[in-house]
Image (spheres, rainbow, N blue to C red):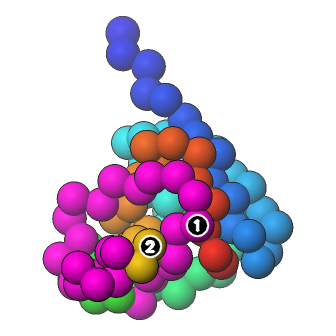
Amino acid sequence: MLVTKTHQVTFKKSGITIEVAEDEYILEKAEEAGMDLPYDCRSGTCTTCMQRCLEGEVDQDLAFAISDEELKEGYRLICIGSPLSDVTLDA
């Protein structure tokens, strides 16, 4: 049986830390924890949920709307983003 790794996702401004597995989306788990974060499409085709990743790595293969420049600046789409390590977001 394959066990999916979980990671700590910390929202710096709100001071909240949640556990998110590598096969789960950060936005969904944040909502389950009672957080109210902006989103619209939930499919990586807009940038409403975009958050700056200060530390760690986020997998977001389905992120179509984010530009190369935004990626270089550390922005990630958390509606389709899953943590690959412990992550700190500027939210």
Q: Is residue 27 magenta?
A: no
Nearest to the observer: residue 30 or residue 73: 73
Location of the C terminus by quadrant is bottom right
Q: Is residue 28 left or right of residue 15?
A: left
Proximity of marks 1 and 2: CB atoms separated by less than 8 Å: yes
Q: Which residue is mark 2?
A: 74
Residue 8 marker = none
- Residue 68, percent from left and from top: 23, 79
Q: Is residue 86 left or right of residue 25?
A: right
- Residue 85, percent from left and from top: 51, 42
Residue extent of the magenta highlight: 48-72
Q: Amino acid at mark 2?
A: Gly
Q: Amino acid at mark 1?
A: Leu
Give the class, few, some or many, for how many residues have Cα within 10 Å of label 1's Cα (few <14, many ≥20): some
Location of the N terminus by quadrant is top left
At 76% from the left and 77% from the top, the residue drawn is: 13
Count of picture labels: 2
Answer yes or no: is residue 74 visible: yes
Q: Earlier in the sequence, mark 1 or mark 2?
A: 1
Cα–Cα gap, marks 1 and 2 = 7 Å
Answer yes or no: is residue 32 visible: no
Decide: is 60 above or below 75: above
Residue 54 marker = 1
At 69% from the left and 59% from the top, the residue drawn is: 10
Decide: is 7 above or below 56: above
- Residue 31, percent from left and from top: 60, 67
Decide: is 45 above or below 1: below
- Residue 54, percent from left and from top: 58, 67
